[in-house]
Amino acid sequence: MRLFVALMLSDAFRASIINTQAALRKCGIKGTYTAPDSLHVTLAFIGEQKSPSAANDALKQVSFSPFEISAGPLGYFRSSSIIWQGLEDNGNIVMLAEKVRTALQRSGVPFDGKPAVPHITLIRRASSFDAEKIAVPTETMTVERIDLMRSDVISGRRVYTSLFYRKAES
């Protein structure tokens, strides 16, 4: 099974991101738009595992306090033609990603070691990118949990399922 650790979005935050995607469509940008129920922030990509138990055990070791995030500027990964929504968080997402990755490493769970770049993928294989025409949402949310997610392809569509979550400590 394919696994990753993520921050899932609140309904209000997701709605603001969906509005941004609609604005990108209205500007004529074509590509593969991320489905609303698949919008998330990846903290660590684990990849193929036979069982989620070691990753579950690792996440049980991660402690963090709730923190606020808000939408930042749009960005573009030119090498992969991905348009993404940036996030403002005072470095909290990167710090949390490091805690998650340290716990995974201690538990012997392999993961993609690319640096954490806090973002939400909006469009893959985007036909173009012109951020000046798009208004960035002002929505904020409180991060109160992290999820171990399973990724499956069902009827040609990627579907994410939460297998375990770890709540923030107040």
Image (cartoon, grey):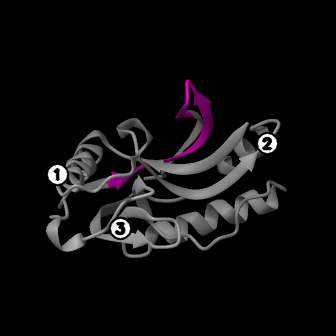
- Kindly report the distance in space between the C-alpha atoms of the residues bearing marks 2 and 1: 40 Å
**Percent coordinates x, y for residue 34 in the rendering:** 40, 45
**Residue 61 at least partly seen:** no
Q: Which residues are magenta?
A: 142-161
For mark 2, does the 10 Å Cα neighbourhood hold few (<14), some (14 to 19), or many (20 or more) residues? some
Q: Say which element carries label 3.
A: strand
Q: Which mark is residue 139?
A: none
The residue lying toward the viewer, choosing from 137 and 122, is 122
Residue 49 vertical position relative to residue 107 in the rendered view, above or below: above
Residue 19 picture location, percent across and down:
20, 48
Tell me the CA gap for discs 3 and 1. Answer: 20 Å
Provide the secondary structure element on which disc 2 rests: loop
Residue 63 among magenta residues: no
Which mark sits nearer the N-terminus, 3 or 1? Answer: 1
Please name the amino acid that badge 1 sits on: Lys
The residue pinned by badge 3 equals 86
Q: Amino acid at mark 3?
A: Gly
Crowding near pointer 3: few (<14 within 10 Å), some, many (20+)? some
Q: How many marks?
A: 3
> At 70% from the left edge and 62% from the top edge, which residue is drawn?
112
Mostly what secondary structure, the magenta segment? strand
Of the numbered discs 2 and 1, the one sitting upstream in the chain is: 1
Residue at the (80%, 36%) spot, across then down: 51
What residue is pinned by disc 2? Answer: 49
Residue sitting nearer the eye, 96 or 1: 1
Q: Nearer the viewer, mark 2 or mark 1?
A: 1
Q: Estimate how packed mark 1 is, as few (under 14), some (14 to 19) or many (20 or more) residues with alpha carbons within 10 Å.
A: few
Q: Secondary structure at mark 1?
A: helix
Q: Is residue 116 visible?
A: yes
In the rendered structure, find residue 26 and report the number of the disc placed on it: 1
Q: Of the residues under marks 2 and 3, which one precedes in the sequence?
A: 2
